[in-house]
Structure formats: C-alpha cells, structure tokens
Amino acid sequence: MTTSHELASPSRRAILAAPLVLPAVVGGTSSGSALARPGPASDTLVAFYSRTGNTRVIAGQIRRARGADLFEIRTVEPYPEDYERTVEQARRETEASFEPALATDALDIARYRTIYLGFPIWGQTAPPAIRSFLKAHAWAGKTIRPFVTHGGYGLGTSMAVLASHSRGALRAPPFAIEADQERRTLSRVTDWLGAA
C-alpha cells in the first residue's frame, strides 16, 4: 500500500535527474538539443544520447564533477515510445548503416579538448544517433572519454564504431555499466500479467 509520504517523496532517479532538467530548459532551443553551461567557459563537454534516462543521469554527474558543458544528442525524428518498436527500428537502421538526422544547436566542438561521450548499447553496438553525431564533427586532437550503459551484453562493437567515426581522436578506456531496467521491468510486468 502506498502512503501519502511515498507519493510526495521523489524517487532517487528523479532527484538525480532534476539538475539536468533546468539547464536543458534554459539552454535549449527550438531544435530540440540543449547546450547547458554551468558557469565560465569550459574546455570539457559532456555529450550524451539517452532514451530512458539512465545515460542522462550519468551525464549529469560527470558535468557536475568536471564543471563541463552539457549537450544532449537528439534525433529530428524521435524513436517510438514503445520499447520493442524502438529495438526493431534500431536493428533495421544499424543493418542499413543508417545515420539519422540530428536536431542540433550550433555546437562549436572545436573549443573542447575533452569530450565525455555517453550512450546506451543498442543491438550490441552504438545507437545510430551516435554515428551521426561522430560523423558531424572533426575529432583530430580531441580526447573522447566514452561512458556506456548496457543491458548485460557489454560494449559490443561500440568501440569499433567510435574508432571508425572519430579518426584522429585519442579514445580513453570506456566506463561501462549495466542499466537494463526497462527490459527487466517490461519482462516482469509481462510475467505478472500472464499469471493473472
């Protein structure tokens, strides 16, 4: 039974994500992408792509710890809200080497020396939006520090995607963490519904 205290108490995820909401709203534009600056100009950027919010939470923590600028990578056409439809669309796009159009601000990546690049693993590789983002910028002389969320299968071929799409960059070893709550939740709810 849920008490009124539980209803009023925000979740840990909501608390962690809250610092990201205001900068994204303040720094956003009509294009849908957001560049949030925490203070004076920084030579460090945290760029991330996140569908469910797992990668977004890590991006916010890195931004705060490094005093970095924050940039959310977004596609012009959003992916379906339905998890299974997104999985299928991402599979087709990956097989076709499709690179979706991005909703972008005028991101001047030239001014950054270090780029923390975050994304989830989709179909055992980087999402198509990451290929588009990498292809859109010059990487020579930059250091890319990847941080990756995955559903238990590890990095897959994502580091090969980074290597082929960010020539000239120094790529630091990635930080990877299992974060498959959406798949687990859907599976558990399906099992529960099946038992009813």
Image: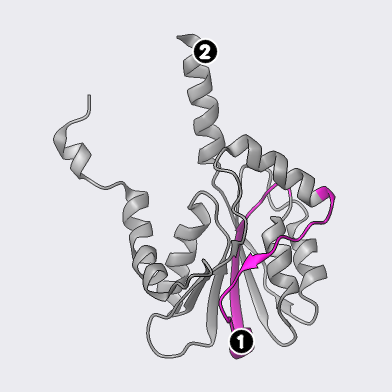
Number of marks: 2
Residue ID at (48%, 24%): 189
Q: In the figure, residue 9 lies in which quadrant?
A: top left
* Residue 83 horizontal/vertical position (percent): 59, 38
Q: Amino acid at mark 1?
A: Arg
Q: Which residue is mark 2?
A: 194
Res. 123 visible in picture:
no
Cα separation, mark 1 vs mark 2, equals 52 Å
Residue ID at (60%, 81%): 114
Q: Bin the neighbour count of mark 2 within 10 Å (Cα to Cα): few under 14, some 14-19, many 20 and up.
A: few
Which residue range is magenta in the image?
A: 95-124
Q: Bin the neighbour count of mark 1 within 10 Å (Cα to Cα): few under 14, some 14-19, many 20 and up.
A: some
Residue 121 falls inside the magenta stretch: yes
* Residue 31 horizontal/vertical position (percent): 53, 69
Q: Which residue is mark 1?
A: 113
Ranked by sequence position, the earlier of labels 1 and 2 is 1
Q: Nearer the viewer, residue 135 or 150?
A: 135
